Image (cartoon, rainbow, N blue to C red):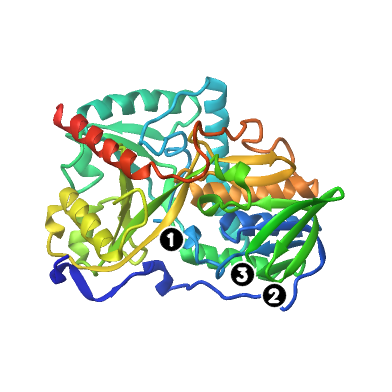
Amino acid sequence: MTASILDSSFKEEPYWWEAFRPQAIEAPSLPGRTDVVVVGGGYAGLATARALADGGVKSVVLEAEEFGSGASTRSGGGISAGLSIGKSFAGKSLDYAPELVRDVVGWAVEAYRGLFDLVEKENIDCHLEQHGRFLGACAVSHYDGLRARFDKLRAGGATDCYLVSREEQRQEIGSDFYHGGMVLETAGKLHPALFYGGLLAAARRRNSITLAGHCRATGLARSGDGWRVTTGAGDIEARHVVIATNGYTSGLTPQLQRRLVPIASHIIATEELPADLVQKLCPKGRTFSETRRVLHYYRISPDGRRVIFGGRARFTEIPGELRARLLHRAMVERFPELADTKVTHTWQGNVAFTYDALPHAGEIDGLHFILGCNGSGVSMMPFLGDAMGKSIAGKLHGRMPFADTALPAIPLYSGNPWFLPAIGGAFRALDYIDEKIR
């Protein structure tokens, strides 16, 4: 990569960590027994523990690294009430029964509203704002696909979305790259690390939660009517175990690992830009995503001075300078005026995709789980964690979201996504073909 693209302060870590860094919280000692062990200290795990505590149930949250080191502080921070639900890692929207569409849209709206309620209730300062999302069609045929998707969303109860023609899209985005698109007004963005920090602080305020960082769960075994969880710091007996490891699900739970495909998502942050240029690129404060199989997503930083640009530069982890070069090139394709803009930060994190492109929460082999963000984790994972905690505590009113949709196994897959580089290449080829057939 040419040195001119990298800023002199270039860092291979999330831009978000400038405001909140992962926390090394280690329990002085683990209790020998607790009500619930939560494996995974991200949004889902912390939200589960919070709801358990409010329901009078004790828990231990095991985090293999520092709290906040995983995907919860590595996303782009975009949120929406359903625009991304049901979109596979191939960028394809899947067909569902009308009843399921209504349920999914309803849960997505609940998750979105619940996020605002959570931020207000816990007084979390995380730059949460609602300015909508523009989903750009990368080919003429993709715009036709958006029409069908729009009809399904509207039939499912999403009344705040509308189509935008190519002639009108400059009102939404300062780019001619797309062939029109769709806007979802019930969408917004936040600072993901500050949101995580606020959720972590909320957990620390509850005395019935034990936070154990640098404490990897290494074994799970049935023990009477509960579980024994083995860690490097000792064993814990628990009535229930909740797996909330998402894109970092390991061989600890092979029955779950083979139902999830972890795909690396990569992001860059640019140097500070002139205010008039930012206004030109993003006239309405939207977040942006697109219809490519190998998609990109982007937004303006909370201070209104940088572009945060992400996507699948590759489907696996890659070196920082290569990430920066590939994402910078894609950014310039959409915004040619950013050709000389430097990159100050680059980072990556794992997104967990499921075979049916839906998040899932439920029970398998006696284990509770919250898995499969499919790119919508910022609002959906806290929502499902809250519901899971209330369910175990006997405080959930109504049914558990997604519990009636079984987490499907992936044919011929054991948990090792060896095929991702080949699939990534094939998807890029298909995107190229789509975009050349105008």
Residue 74's label in the rendered image is 1
Sequence-first disc among 3 and 2 = 2
212, 20: nearer the viewer: 212
Residue 67 on image: x %, y %: 56, 68
Is disc 1 placed on a helix, strand or loop?
Answer: loop
> On screen, 107 above or below 263?
above
Which of the two marks, 3 or 2, is nearer to us in this view?
2
Residue 124 on image: x %, y %: 55, 65
Residue behind mark 2: 27
Is disc 2 placed on a helix, strand or loop?
Answer: loop
Amino acid type of the residue that numbered disc 1 sits on in the rendered structure: Arg
Figure label count: 3
Residue 408 on image: x %, y %: 57, 32
Is disc 3 placed on a helix, strand or loop?
Answer: helix
Callout 3 crowding tier (Cα within 10 Å): few <14, some 14–19, many ≥20: some
In the image, taking residue 175 as reference, residue 88 lies left or right, namely right
252, 346: nearer the viewer: 252
71, 397: nearer the viewer: 71
Sequence-first disc among 2 and 1 = 2
> On screen, 157 above or below 171?
above
Sequence-first disc among 1 and 3 = 1
In the rendered image, the quadrant that contains the C terminus is top left
Amino acid type of the residue that numbered disc 2 sits on in the rendered structure: Ala
Residue at 69%, 70% in the rendered image: 205
Residue 123 visible somewhere in the drawing: no
Residue 126 on image: x %, y %: 48, 64
Callout 1 crowding tier (Cα within 10 Å): few <14, some 14–19, many ≥20: many
Picture quadrant where residue 39 is located: bottom right
Residue behind mark 3: 201
In the image, taking residue 183 as reference, residue 45 lies left or right, namely right
